[in-house]
Amino acid sequence: MQGIRFIRFVVVLCVLAVAAFAVNAQGANSGSIQGVVKDATGAAVPSAQVEISDVVSGYHREAKTNDQGQFAFSNVPFNGYHLVANAAGFAALTQDVDVRSAVPVSLELTLKVGSANTTVTVSAEAQDLVETTPTAHTDVDVNLFGKLPLESQSSSITSLITLSTPGVFADSNGNFHGLGDHAQNSFSVDGQPITDQQSKVFSNQIPLDSVQSLEVIEGAPPAEFGDKTSLVIKVTTRSGLGQTKPTGSVYTSYGNFGTANLGFDLAAGGNKWGNYVAVNGLNSGRFLDPPEFSVMHDKGNQQNFFDRADFKLSANNSLQLNLGYIRSWFQTPNSFDAQTASAWSGLVVDNGGLGPNGLPVGPADQRSQIKTFNIAPTFTHLIGSNALFTVGLFARKDQYNYFPSNNPFADLLPDLQSETVGQSRRLTNLGVRSDISYVKGHHNFKAGVTYEHTLLNEKDSFGIVDPTLNPVCDNADGSINTNPLITNPAQCGGVGNPGGSADPNFTPLLGCFDLTRTAPLPASDGCAAGFARSGLDNFLGHSDIKELALYVQDAISWRNWTVNIGVRGDFYNGLSTARQAEPRVGLAYNIKRTNTVLRLSYAHTFETPFNENLVLSSLGCNDAAINAIMSVTIGQPCLTSPLSPGLRNEYHAGFEQAFGRYLVLDAEYIWKYTHNAYDFSVFGSTPLTFPIEWQRSKIPGYTLRATVPNYHGFTAYFVASHVAARFFAPQVTGIGATPGAAGGVFRIDHDENFEQTTHLQYQIGKRGPWIGFNWRYDSGLVAGPIPCAGGNCNNGPNGTDSIVDVSGLSPDQQFEAGLFCGSVHATPTTPISANGLCPASQYGSTLISVPVAGTEDDDHNPPRIAPRHLFDASIGDDDLFHGDRFKWSLRLTVINLTNKTALYNFLSTFSGTHYVTPRTATAELGFHF
């Protein structure tokens, strides 16, 4: 039924886009500049050169006037620009232009007679480097990220944001933590809201080839943005409108791990239409970040298609249509434990390398497939010269499938995976957005409405593959009995268990799904008579999430002041219901004589639940089998209340300072307090994750950004931040009840003391070679349960401070953590000590900062990933043979130049253990026309 509704919605989208003229709406992320160039007598000046540029973001566009002296720039991201107009026989004219709304900016430029000069020089003054806006943000244009060494071709968008934006902490698999929150990030792609997770283990990201520019809002979000607002990423896609001479490129690349990429893009159009299309395919032997520095079972591929069509229906009406389809398939990377299951699993070794089902176990072979489809038409109507009406519709669908190993016993991993699990999950987001913008005098007014209907379908299956998880009997010596023929406590003490007794924690219901027990079950066990453990438990979940948002806002500019005021109203109706009014206010003052901008802002926001596995998390405990497996796993009752929206108050104070024409510094202090703060947990001991809520969180921190605009071909920027993510127990919603820290306060695993990225770039002339260089430093995220002694660890014998007990980790996990005891370092098959004990004075790690014995504190001194310095470089030439119409390009990119061995995380509750990318070299050849 959901599929039929989705198809119907897609079929009528384009018709509704035109017919929706009577609806109220929301605009896109770009505006336009149009105008006419005249001489002192009022006559038109044809063939005049007009340029607009933002020297901070790197944005630059050029146009020539027609016979009537007219020029136009469309698809211009919201920002301030420096305009230069020049023509032979006239003096150059310079002017600053602000584009802060979708309402077109109309200019009349008058050139004065001067010396003949057709060479245009763009030279911004110091005042052009600062913006009088109350909201801190980072602007990134294609001219920058076209030469930025990016780590992941399958998640280039998040890699770009991590490297260019302060307050963003890097994590594995394209995930990032914005300002101390996990995935509280939203994208606005040409005005279409996307608030679901964009990590490549949840969804497919839009291809970087489709992006013209980004604006990343780190400050208090304006009223038009809601749902997840820790970071708001406004994306302006590329367009072919006005591209009378078709341009495009074909490129291919190859690098380490057999990573190959092939793609092309094409922009073509005229004054009334335009089309931009980008297609590419990727195949890699290291698609995800694995739990070992070595790579095993990590193949993946991805195919992207993006198309944007623009039509000017009349002087005042236009239509834009975005289409996208992305498919990715990838293996779950194996650890040494997963790759050689028979080497460590007594269950397998004792059975001659066979599982209880009699089949060879072999390495784990878990895989995923994600298909993402998106269609988004937008209609705009210009009302007079000061107002613009916009209406847009959108439909986006993620189909996610997780496949277990063919032999379920290959999925057994010590302390990580006790169940084999499979999933088929579909997330369909349908919506309409509408707004009206009005710009006149001191006011930039906007009011709008967004309605979204998200349909969730979840199918999860699981079976127990660990015989120690739900044992029927204990042996006479107190150890767990794993005889696969024993299925009923009545058999304890008999054949196969002499002198033994029933295990007091045995749960009969879970016996129905225990694949390690091979004999049929009697009816008295609560299962059907003769039930053989060949089937899995299935959880089916469905929900419709309906959200309505109304907002009104105004940016008032008066002399040196800019004041943003607004209010948003959100209505959430899903597995829980809530509504909230959210005031937003910001103030900025420009001290022009010193080129200083001071700013303050406040926002009350409504944080909506994550949609990924929301039904399982909210309703799973109502299912007896889910309740039982979670209770056994966590050792306490399973929570049953559904997730509900959280409420946040956030405060920002900052400044922007220009130093001459060559340096601009931006700094921001943030403080966020959230009631019902979100994070993720895991189902049982499996890779299946779901959202949970903690009682509250406090997140203070600061961000810094310094930018050196283009100076004779040299550009640079520096971004840095510190954010403390303090969460307060107890867990209040979400299945399970993750144990909190002693005292109820802990640093969550996306807390990091300090990070910085320095990017240097040099271009030789306008057509010569170039080089780009990154230096990234991370002080380290909070690590998972690394063994230590004393403090809040207490995992030495009797909680002593002098001895550390690491027996809870397999030798491979000890190796992944870089553990050592004296001169003995763990290997994938050898632990640091035979009995698992190590004197605290000899214990340590090469990859994790372990607190000194007796000092560990979950709030003030938790274990952390060890600090790391990573260096990347690119070198290339965009015009190898100095062609005119046709050009060849060549670039070489090296990630992790020093081949640094380092972790992103270790035994993270959310995602496990992952290493950073080893040294990887990629060569790319392109043809451009």
Image: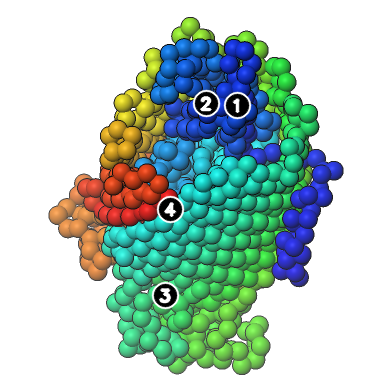
Mark closest to the chain's N terminus, 4 or 1: 1
Q: CA separation, marks 1 and 2?
A: 7 Å
- Secondary structure found at label 2: loop
Q: Residue at x 73, y 45 (%)?
A: 313
Mark 2: amino acid: Ala
- Crowding around mark 1 (Cα neighbors within 10 Å: few <14, some 14 to 19, many 20+) is many
- Which residue is at the front of the view, 907 or 86? 86
How many numbered circles does the render carry?
4
Residue on which disc 4 sits: 249
**Helix, strand, or loop for circle 1?**
loop
Q: Quick one: label 3 or label 2, which is nearer the N terminus?
A: 2
Q: Which residue is mark 3?
A: 365
Tag 3, which secondary structure?
Answer: loop
Whether residues under marks 1 and 2 lie with C-beta atoms below 8 angstroms apart, the answer is yes
Residue closer to the observer: 755 or 21: 21
Mark 1 is on which residue type? Gly
State the image coordinates of residue 634 (x, y, percent, origin top left): 53, 61
Q: Residue at x 54, y 16 (%)?
A: 111
